[in-house]
Amino acid sequence: MTDSPSQDTLAGRYGSARSGLSPRTRRWLIIGALAAAVAAAVYFAIGNAVGQLTYKDVGYTIHSDTQMTVDYEVSKDFDVTAQCMLHALDSSYAVVGATIVTIGPDEEGSSAEDRSRYFETDLRTEYRAVTGIVDRCWEVDA
């Protein structure tokens, strides 16, 4: 029968067992890691939002077979001039009307929340449209 080695024999051969982190140290490490994660999330969220040109469709109104209005939101820096391509589409997604809208610099805004503005633009169509969209927006060099 073999005897299992005692803890004293193992400690003498390999060194004493490591002690774990104290609960207080462990708590501070977790708090530090959470704070770093929140700081990184805020940094990336703000860093990606500022300086980017974004747009989204808000809605549309069809007035007749040859006229409609597209509602949309554009977020951009205050000193940037942008242009957006708007399309009126029929039921087979064919373009039946299009226009390019220029959105100039904005002197009214002062905070990051003011970067977004809503617009509505009238489009003439060749046939009856079933939807209106913002195809894309881009910055224009002034």
Image: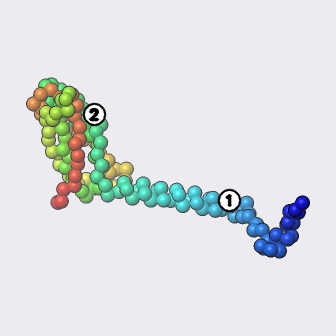
At x 14% / y 41%, what residue is drawn?
A: 99
Tell me residue 78's x, y (percent).
28, 55
Nearest the eye: 101 or 33: 33
Please tell me in which quadrant of the rendered image residue 120 appears: top left
Q: Where does the image place residue 109, in percent across and percent down from the top left?
A: 31, 53
Classify residue 63 as left or right of residue 44.
left
Residue 88 falls in image quadrant: top left
Q: Is residue 100 visible?
A: yes
In-image side of 11 versus 115 (left or right): right
| Picture layout, residue 44 above or below residue 17 | above
Q: How is the image coloured?
A: rainbow
Q: Position of residue 47 (x, y in %)?
A: 39, 58
Q: Nearer the viewer, mark 1 or mark 2?
A: 1
Residue density around tag 2, few if under 14, some if 14–19, many if 20 or more, within 10 Å: some
In the image, what residue occupies the spot 56% across and 59% down? Answer: 35
**Residue type (three-letter) at the residue carrying disc 2:** Gly
Q: Can residue 103 be seen in this view?
A: no
**Residue, far front:** 1
Measuring 32% from the left and 47% from the top, which residue is drawn there? 116
Q: Determine whether the residue tagged by mark 2 lies in a helix, strand or loop.
A: strand
Q: Is residue 100 above or below residue 112?
A: above
Q: First in sequence: mark 1 or mark 2?
A: 1
Identify the residue position indicated by label 1 in the image.
27
Residue nearest the observer in this picture, 1 or 31? 1
- In which quadrant is the C terminus drawn? bottom left
The picture places residue 3, in percent across and down from the top left corner, at 88, 63
Q: Is mark 1 on a helix, strand or loop?
A: helix
Kindly identify which residue carries mark 2: 59
